[in-house]
């Protein structure tokens, strides 16, 4: 296992009706002038936004609001949010929604304490500070409620890029599984695939002797595989929603990624798909992950065989580990299909003729990406082709 530092300061406030405590916790974490940030209407329709405002008012916390975040959140609204924060001397941002809302809030938090363009941080500028962000999560998927990441799409070129730093970890996150019961099956399935991907990007590693994080990762994956179909069959199954909600958090706050190399190539390739076609992130991952696995599995057949045996219950063929490894990938594809996810370009609405453009906007040039297997632009092209 490698040396590591792990800093995960977020307070999690988990369970039924806990959003009623939003005001109390905002005050406790120092929020006095708050921006409530939300999406395109689900939190208005459900009444959640009104409940949150009531809670802030009762706690005597001043607030203003900015809605309108869209999936694959855009730079335009971030610029408006940054300007609003500076004008109104905002000192705390409360994101109410899914990963896109939280990521947009994190971007505003970066821009609000910076004189330049917030996008600089998505082009590699070192992050030093941000306004505190807290979340009330309504969609189990991205893990942004506990992660150090934010992903934004710049309208100029539709470039989808990430920024990461510990200062972006939320001060607190309210996780009420009931808030996710209104999710349609498609979003529930996208979430399951995204959570699986967050674990799998960490699972396929070159670091040896990482039994604790391997076993944690396998436990999270098994939970998602068991609970997602239950939540899709009965959207009001509280326990299935609760297990998924916590799985989504531990899948991406790095609990199972510390002390080992991880490899985010599938996510990077997916970001080009959702940047170009505006598809749901989880659906894009369901297409890219099996293609990446098929391309790299010979690098370490035994790790893929372990995935097949421990996660998918396949029988180990000691004479032919390639066969076992492939079975694991097939079982992943069967799972994705069984919950209604696409696994090929055409099902996603992506086109083979756009592959050169996808490779170009990913922008590797002469460099490589990934760590399990270092990929060149040519490898990336071949992986996209495998997904067709
Ligand atoms: O905008 P509203 O009206 O709220 O509707 C949303 C949206 O249309 C809807 N929704 C959310 N909660 C709901 C609900 N509908 C009914 N009932 C509810 N309770 O769901 C739609 C999708 O929401 P979105 O926030 O876009 O989904 P998700 O949470 O999957 O976030 C995806 C984004 O997160 C990024 C992705 O790239 C993508 O842009 N990621 C962020 C990461 C991070 N910050 O650490 C890591 C991830 O790998 C990921 O890349
Ligand atoms: Zn993801």
Image (spheres, rainbow, N blue to C red):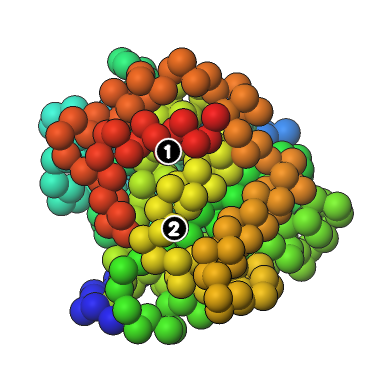
Disc on res. 383: 1
Which residue is at a point 74% across and 41% down the rendered structure image?
A: 340
The quadrant holding residue 223 is bottom right
Left or right relative to 377: residue 171: right
For numbered disc 2, what is the local secondary structure? Answer: helix
Name the residue located 28 percent from the left edge and 45 percent from the top edge: 375
Which residue lies most toward the front here?
319
Q: Earlier in the sequence, mark 1 or mark 2?
A: 2
Q: Using the image, determine if residue 77 lies above or below residue 101.
A: above
Q: Position of residue 47 (x, y in %)?
A: 71, 40
* 343 relative to 166, above or below: above
Mark 2, Cα crowd under 10 Å, few <14 / some 14-19 / many 20+, is many
Which image quarter: residue 366?
A: top left
Instruction: Measuring from the top left, give residue 149's x and y in whole percent.
Output: 35, 50
Circle 1 SS class: helix
| Residue 39 in sight here | no
Position in image of residue 300 (x %, y %): 39, 66
Q: Is mark 1 within 8 Å of ligand 2?
A: no
Q: Which residue is mark 2?
A: 297
Q: Quadrant of the C terminus?
A: top right
Residue at horizontal 15 percent and vertical 51 percent from the top: 128
């Amino acid at each position: 296992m490698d040396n590591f530092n792990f800093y995960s300061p977020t307070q999690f406030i988990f369970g039924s009706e806990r959003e009623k405590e939003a005001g109390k916790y905002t005050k406790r974490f120092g929020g006095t002038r708050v921006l409530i940030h939300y999406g395109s209407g689900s939190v208005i329709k459900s009444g959640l936004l009104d409940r949150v405002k009531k809670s802030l008012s009762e706690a005597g916390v001043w607030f203003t609001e900015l809605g309108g975040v869209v999936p694959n959140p855009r730079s335009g609204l971030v610029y408006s949010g940054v300007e609003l924060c500076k004008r109104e001397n905002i000192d705390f941002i409360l994101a109410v929604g899914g990963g896109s809302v939280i990521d947009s809030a994190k971007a505003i938090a970066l821009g609000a304490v910076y004189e330049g363009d917030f996008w600089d941080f998505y082009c590699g500028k070192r992050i030093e500070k941000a306004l505190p962000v807290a979340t009330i999560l309504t969609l189990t998927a991205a893990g942004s409620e506990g992660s150090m990441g934010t992903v934004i799409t710049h309208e100029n070129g539709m470039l989808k890029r990430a920024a990461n730093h510990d200062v972006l970890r939320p001060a607190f996150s309210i996780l009420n599984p009931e808030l996710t019961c209104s999710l349609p099956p498609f979003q529930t399935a996208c979430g399951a695939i995204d959570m699986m991907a967050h674990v799998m990007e960490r699972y396929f590693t070159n670091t040896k002797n990482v039994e604790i994080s391997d076993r944690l990762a396998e436990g999270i994956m098994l939970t998602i595989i068991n609970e997602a179909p239950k939540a899709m069959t009965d959207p009001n199954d509280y326990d299935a929603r609760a297990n998924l909600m916590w799985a989504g958090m531990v899948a991406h706050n790095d609990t199972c990624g510390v002390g080992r190399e991880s490899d985010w190539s599938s996510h990077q390739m997916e970001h080009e798909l959702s940047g170009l076609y505006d598809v749901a992130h989880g659906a894009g991952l369901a297409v890219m992950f099996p293609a990446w696995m098929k391309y790299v599995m010979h690098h370490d057949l035994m790790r893929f065989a372990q995935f097949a045996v421990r996660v998918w219950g396949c029988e180990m063929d000691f004479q032919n580990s390639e066969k076992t490894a492939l079975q694991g990938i097939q079982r992943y594809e069967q799972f994705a299909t069984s919950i209604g996810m696409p696994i090929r370009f055409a099902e996603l609405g992506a086109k083979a003729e756009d592959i050169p453009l996808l490779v170009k906007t990913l922008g590797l040039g002469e460099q490589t990406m990934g760590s399990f297997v270092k990929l060149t632009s040519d490898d990336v092209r071949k992986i996209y082709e495998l997904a067709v």
